[in-house]
Amino acid sequence: GMDLEFPVRQTNVDRLLHLREIELEREAGDHSYGRKAYMAYVTEGLGNLLEWDEIMMFQRKNGSFFNCPSTTAATLVNHYNDKALQYLNCLVSKFGSAVPTVYPLNIYCQLSWVDALEKMGISQYFVSEIKSILDTTYVSWLERDEEIMLDITTCAMAFR
């Protein structure tokens, strides 16, 4: 619709659109929470194929959808929401035009750091830093912080 030209053959585009249709048909019969979450996460390519009011249940306290700027932007384009706009404005003011693919990742990054130090066998040199990270993570765990509870990898590391 925008008359953009891509150096891709039409057969490749048709194949991608066909795969998208197959995926949408496969998902159509499933009305589970997991399916709804999956469809919300891949909003960028679905446009008017989604029930945008249903997607709103996946909005996090920080205004994002899955802490993902692109998913949040796609949702905002199709279903205006002040909290989503605030999240995106915050990212742009913090990072400029090159925002991270997922934000925030504070707890995940810190726990990964602790894990790496332990695997390298040098954690004994960072005892106070590790204790501080683990204490903060524990408080967040008790508060059921979204950054931990809604990301399986972060949740598993925090549990461990």
Image (tube, grey):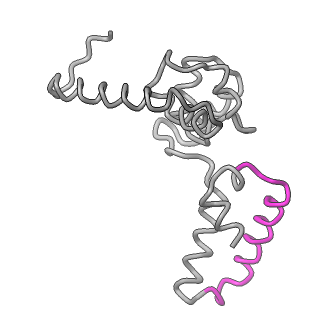
What x and y, as percent, mark residue 50?
54, 20
From the viewer's perspective, is residue 35 above or below residue 28? below
Give whichever of 48, 18 is nearer the camera: 18
Name the image quarter holding residue 9.
top left
Name the image quarter holding residue 89.
top right
Quarter placement of the N terminus:
top left
The residue at the point 47 percent across, 28 percent down is 44
What x and y, as percent, mark residue 40?
57, 32
Q: Is residue 142 magenta?
A: yes
What x and y, as percent, mark residue 13?
23, 26
The residue at the point 36 percent across, 29 percent down is 22
Q: Which residues are magenta?
A: 123-146
What x and y, as percent, mark residue 82?
70, 22
The residue at the point 68 percent across, 49 percent down is 150
In the picture, measured across the screen, residue 145 lies left or right of residue 65, that is right
The residue at the point 50 percent across, 41 percent down is 99
In the picture, measured across the screen, residue 97 lies left or right of residue 76, that is left
From the viewer's perspective, is residue 26 above or below residue 155? above
From the viewer's perspective, is residue 140 above or below residue 129? above
